[in-house]
């Protein structure tokens, strides 16, 4: 709002683009390669890169990270994206697609339409903006909190619980709009939970697939989620034209989030355990002492 007021709407996109470039450079410099990719493909300098990652995770120096006898053929063999719907991965793929679609539908509806719907329901434009800011603040807090929790608890079950809690919070939020203070508080709660759900999907999805198809599995799931993101504002606008009230719309979103929770509940156990210490342990073998 400050940029737009002082320099016009183009400045918002300019700053956003510059920040994205800065983040890209930081990722290229700082983000390490996947442990499983380094262990299976063994690019130049892979041993030193694995040791740096192991040191960050406090793996003892006497642990052999890449024994010569370690079989790697299964991970090196190229795999087609069609493997995502093969017999061994079909359940996980369909379930995560539904979960992504439902979660992104709810996420974009809540973040995009809430200020407008609240203004239509009787709030001033300034009050609607405040609630929108509360959603954003709650989202930042929720993402960090989920990151702390996921290191201690089962990722898939935590995602299910967060989706159910999001549906409940959305239902309560719509009846709290009569008072600005209550709407702001519930806006923070809804933002926390819905953003945590998105973080949960990013955490769970890579663990469902082996290294050879992991990028395809995550990328296609994100694409399916974007379909939900596109459909959310289209559906909301069409239903408003048909005479639906904000109460009806938010209850619909709550039901969609519950469908996502049901899909997340059906997810099989992950192919790769996501916790850092166990992720490194996959290619790690203890050397025998004489």
Image: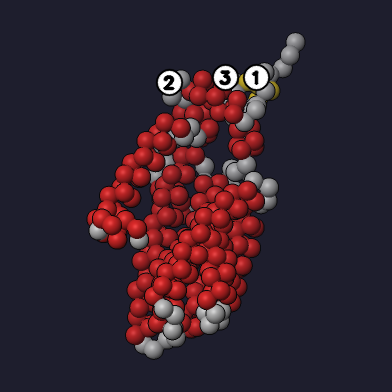
Front position among marks 1 and 2: 1
Give the distance between the C-alpha atoms of the residues marked 1 and 2, in whole angstroms.
21 Å
Q: Which residue, given by chain and number where applicable, does mark 1 sit on?
A: 61
Q: Give the percent coordinates (x, y) of residue 13.
A: 28, 53
Q: Mark 2 vs mark 3: which is more N-terminal?
A: 2
Q: Give the percent coordinates (x, y) of residue 210.
A: 52, 42
Residue at left offset 26%, top offset 55%: 7
119 up-or-down from 20: above or below: below
**Which is nearer the eye, 87 or 93?**
93
Is 166 on the left or on the right of 107, as rendered?
Answer: right
Of helix, strand and loop, which one carries label 1? loop
Total marks in image: 3
Residue at left offset 63%, top offset 20%: 64
Of helix, strand and loop, which one carries label 3? loop
Q: Residues within 10 Å of mark 2 (few under 14, many from 20)?
A: few
Q: Which residue, given by chain and number where applicable, does mark 2 sit on?
A: 44
Residue at left offset 54%, top offset 61%: 138
Q: Which residue, given by chain and number where applicable, does mark 3 sit on?
A: 68
Q: Is residue 197 visible?
A: no
Q: Mark 1 vs mark 3: which is more N-terminal?
A: 1
Is 248 on the left or on the right of 1, as rendered?
Answer: right
Furthest residue toward top: 290
44 up-or-down from 139: above or below: above
């Amino acid at each position: 709002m400050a940029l737009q007021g002082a320099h016009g709407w183009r400045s918002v996109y300019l700053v956003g683009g510059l920040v994205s470039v800065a983040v890209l450079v930081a990722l290229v410099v700082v983000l390490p390669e996947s442990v499983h990719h380094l262990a299976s493909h063994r690019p130049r300098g892979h041993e030193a890169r694995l040791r740096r990652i192991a040191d960050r995770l406090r793996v003892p120096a006497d642990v052999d990270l890449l024994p010569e006898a370690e079989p790697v053929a299964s991970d090196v063999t190229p795999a087609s994206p069609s493997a995502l719907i093969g017999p061994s991965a079909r359940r996980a793929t369909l379930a995560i697609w539904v979960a992504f679609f439902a979660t992104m539908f709810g996420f974009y509806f809540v973040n995009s339409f809430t200020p407008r719907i609240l203004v239509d329901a009787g709030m001033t434009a300034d009050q609607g903006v405040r609630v929108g800011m509360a959603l954003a603040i709650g989202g930042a807090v929720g993402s960090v909190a989920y990151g702390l929790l996921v290191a201690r608890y089962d990722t898939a079950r935590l995602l299910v619980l967060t989706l159910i809690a999001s549906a409940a919070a959305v239902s309560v939020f719509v009846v709290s709009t009569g008072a600005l203070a209550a709407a702001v508080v519930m806006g923070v709660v809804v933002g926390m939970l819905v953003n945590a759900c998105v973080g949960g999907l990013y955490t769970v999805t890579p663990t469902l697939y082996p290294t050879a198809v992991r990028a395809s599995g995550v990328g296609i799931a994100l694409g399916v989620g974007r379909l939900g993101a596109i459909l959310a504002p289209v559906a909301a606008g069409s239903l408003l034209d048909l005479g639906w009230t904000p109460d009806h719309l938010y209850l619909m979103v709550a039901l969609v989030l519950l469908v996502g929770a049901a899909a997340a509940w059906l997810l099989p156990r992950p192919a790769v355990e996501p916790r850092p210490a166990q992720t490194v342990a996959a290619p790690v073998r203890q050397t025998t002492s004489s």
